[in-house]
Image (cartoon, grey):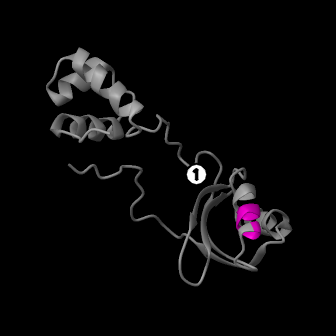
Amino acid sequence: METLDRTDILILRELQKDAKLTTKELAARVNLSPSPVFERQKRLEKEGYIKRYIAVVDPIKAGNGIMVLCNVRLKHHSKEYSQQFTSVIAVIDEVVECFNTSGEYDYMLKIYARNMQDYQNFVLGTLGDLDCIGSLHSIFVIGEVKNTLTIPVKP
């Protein structure tokens, strides 16, 4: 991978603000002509700096009234339990993020649910069916102070 220069950094920052920018609009924002901007953007995609383009959906409007951070402790620290857990979690729609963590718990999940009853059904019916889980600790989010998908881009 090449080192990012000032223009690459500007392109990444602008696309994180608005991925729907046309090449012409992006070129104007980074003070370059469209052709080199197009080539740089394609290179950034090819080199893996840009992983994908997405639409950010409002969770409330999509029917998700609550967000829960759920800490999970596996029954045992084994490759088998870890693989079982991660393979199941990877395909559960309600789980939007999963982190393998250090400390008291093994994983932290970010989960969206319609309401408390929906979350209880999820815990009892979905997570409760996983034999590898030893314990759960749910934290209900009261409000968001900051929520961004923007990654700091450093030279």
Residue 38, how many percent across, how many down?
30, 20
Vertical position of residue 67 compared to residue 34: above or below: below
Image-based side of 145 in relation to 122, left or right: left
Can you tell which quarter of the image residue 71 is in? bottom right
Vertical position of residue 99 compared to residue 149: above or below: below
Residue 136 visible in rendering: yes
Vertical position of residue 153 compared to residue 47: above or below: below
User: Pointer 1: residues within 10 angstroms few (<14), some, or many (20+)?
Assistant: few
Residue found at x 49% / y 36%: 54
Residue 12, how many percent across, how many down?
30, 38
Dominant secondary structure, magenta: helix
Q: Nearer the viewer, residue 55 or 6?
A: 6
Residue found at x 34% / y 33%: 44
Quarter the N terminus occupies: top left
Residue 37, how many percent across, how many down?
25, 23
In the orientation shown, which residue stands out farthest toward the bottom?
Answer: 104
Q: Nearer the viewer, residue 119 or 35?
A: 35
Residue 99, how many percent across, how many down?
56, 64
90 magenta-colored: no
Residue type highlighted by circle 1: Ile
Image-based side of 2 in relation to 121, left or right: left
Residue at the disc numbered 1: 60
Residue found at x 85% / y 64%: 125
Q: Which residues are magenta?
A: 80-85
Image-based side of 93 in relation to 3, left or right: right
